[in-house]
Image (spheres, grey):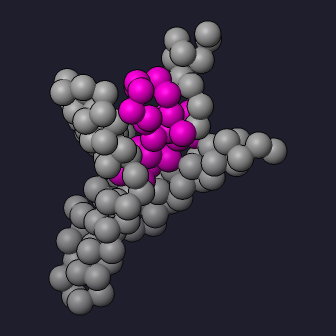
């Protein structure tokens, strides 16, 4: 199996895990869908050009920030002050990134939106 296929399967499993964690924590699964497009606001950076766009998109589509949000949510819960919406936000963010990568939308390169770390997407793929 190619490394790209492995990464896409892995991302799909993260999306599934986000659904399981959300439901197991007692929240409605549909929150993941309600929040799904919110994370694509990071694409607004492309209004300032491909370099800034790629940077903004990659910050919003890296697992680092949702991991930080999840860590804050778990720490708050462990200290007896649960902030449930933070956990749902982190799960929805993981879900979004997982689904994006599972279908081939990877981190962006600076030469255009259609060039990702998982390969070309859209019209660039068909060329």
Which residue is depicted at the point 23% across and 81% down? 76
Position of the C terminus by quadrant: top right
Indicate whether 11 appears above or below 115: below
Q: Given the current orientation, which residue lies at the most extreme bottom position?
A: 79
- The mark total stands at 0
Q: Position of residue 61 (x, y in %)?
A: 38, 46
Q: Position of residue 23 (x, y in %)?
A: 43, 59
Magenta stretch: give its range: 93-117
Which residue is depicted at the point 31% across and 27% down? 50
Indicate whether 69 appears above or below 103: below
Question: Is 122 positioned to the left or the right of 8 in the image?
Answer: left
Which residue is depicted at the point 46% across and 56% down? 18
Camera-side residue: 102 or 45?
A: 45
Q: Where is residue 44 in the image (x, y as percent from the top left)?
A: 21, 30
Classify residue 63 by image quadrant. bottom left
Which residue is depicted at the point 22% across and 33% down? 45
Residue 115 drawn in magenta: yes
Q: Is residue 37 visible?
A: no
Camera-side residue: 124 or 70?
A: 124
Classify residue 74 by image quadrant. bottom left
Question: Is 64 positioned to the left or the right of 15 in the image?
Answer: left
Camera-side residue: 49 or 101?
A: 49
Position of the N terminus by quadrant: top right
Q: Can residue 108 be seen in this view?
A: yes
Q: Given the current orientation, which residue lies at the most extreme right position?
A: 1
Camera-side residue: 104 or 76?
A: 104
Q: Position of residue 34 (x, y in %)?
A: 29, 39
Indicate whether 105 appears above or below 62: above
Indicate whether 13 appears above or below 100: below
Residue 99 drawn in magenta: yes
């Amino acid at each position: 199996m190619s490394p790209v296929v492995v990464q896409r399967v892995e991302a799909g499993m993260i999306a599934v895990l986000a659904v399981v964690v959300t439901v197991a924590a007692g929240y409605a699964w549909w929150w993941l869908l309600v929040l799904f497009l919110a994370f694509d606001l990071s694409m607004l950076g492309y209004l300032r050009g491909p370099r800034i766009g790629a940077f903004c998109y990659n910050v919003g589509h890296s697992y680092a920030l949702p991991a930080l949000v999840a860590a804050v949510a778990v720490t708050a819960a462990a200290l007896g002050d649960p902030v449930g919406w933070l956990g749902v936000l982190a799960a929805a963010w993981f879900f979004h990134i997982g689904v994006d990568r599972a279908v081939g939308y990877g981190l962006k390169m600076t030469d255009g939106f259609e060039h990702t770390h998982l390969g070309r997407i859209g019209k660039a793929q068909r060329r």
